[in-house]
């Protein structure tokens, strides 16, 4: 699994013009599920997401996790994170998990993050054509791949 985490002052996701998920200060997370991903990847990434110390403390140092600022989390599925660009100029998505694996792992990730922060995770709609609006704060953008954890 791969996630792209952005520290934001606000973010929202729209489907057909309707807002489906929205947060103020917190984390905008794009979630990509690959073939072979497991609940172990979900557990590790959920913990890493919530524990990531990328918010400023009173000294202006990135030292606080999202829970310390009472921030929200908006998680949106994005299969394009699994793209391979090794050959040619057209990305290959052959490593992307099918719906039978991707949906349960995405939902599990959202549920575990929600449990860790003690509030619901805002979400988009899996597989929908979505538009995301955000204000990246910093900018701070972190890419985490569960296959590179060791």
Image (cartoon, helix red, strand yellow):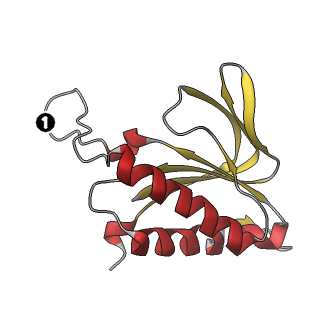
Left or right of residue 24: residue 53: left
Most foreground residue, 15 or 99: 99
Estimate how packed mark 1 is, as few (under 14), some (14 to 19) or many (20 or more) residues with alpha carbons within 10 Å: few
Of all residues, the one furthest to the top in this rendering is 16
Q: What x and y, as percent, mark residue 1?
A: 39, 59
Q: Is residue 80 above or below residue 28?
A: above
Of all residues, the one furthest to the bottom in this rendering is 150
Q: From this viewpoint, is residue 112 visible?
A: yes
Q: What x and y, as percent, mark residue 65?
A: 71, 72
Most foreground residue, 88 or 79: 79
In the rendered image, which residue does mark 1 sit on? Answer: 87
Most foreground residue, 58 or 83: 83
Of all residues, the one furthest to the left in this rendering is 87
Residue drawn at 58 percent across, 28 percent down: 130
Residue drawn at 69 percent across, 72 percent down: 115
Q: Is residue 52 above or below residue 34?
A: below
Left or right of residue 3: residue 76: right
Residue drawn at 74 percent across, 24 percent down: 18
Q: Is residue 89 above or below residue 134?
A: above
Residue drawn at 37 percent across, 49 percent down: 100
Q: From this viewpoint, is residue 62 visible?
A: no
Q: For residue 56, which quarter of the picture?
A: bottom right
Q: For residue 59, which quarter of the picture?
A: bottom right
Q: Is residue 63 above or below residue 85?
A: below
Secondary structure beneath disc 1? Answer: loop
Q: Quadrant of the C terminus?
A: bottom left
Left or right of residue 115: residue 86: left
Q: What x and y, as percent, mark residue 45?
A: 50, 69
Of all residues, the one furthest to the front in this rendering is 100
Q: For residue 107, which quarter of the picture?
A: bottom right
Q: What x and y, as percent, mark residue 30?
A: 53, 48
């Amino acid at each position: 699994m791969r996630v792209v985490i952005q520290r934001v002052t606000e973010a929202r996701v729209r489907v057909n013009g309707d807002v489906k998920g929205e947060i103020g200060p917190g984390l905008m997370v794009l979630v990509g599920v690959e073939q072979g991903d497991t609940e172990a990847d979900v557990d590790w990434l959920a913990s890493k997401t919530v524990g990531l110390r990328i918010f400023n403390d009173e000294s202006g140092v990135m030292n606080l996790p999202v829970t310390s600022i009472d921030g929200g989390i908006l998680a949106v599925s994005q299969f394009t994170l699994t793209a391979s660009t090794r050959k040619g100029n057209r990305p290959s998505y052959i490593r992307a998990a099918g719906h039978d694996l991707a949906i349960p792992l995405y939902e599990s990730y959202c549920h575990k993050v929600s449990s860790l922060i003690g509030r619901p995770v805002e979400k988009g709609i899996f597989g929908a054509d979505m538009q995301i609006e955000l204000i990246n704060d910093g900018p701070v953008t972190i890419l985490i791949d569960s296959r590179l954890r060791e």
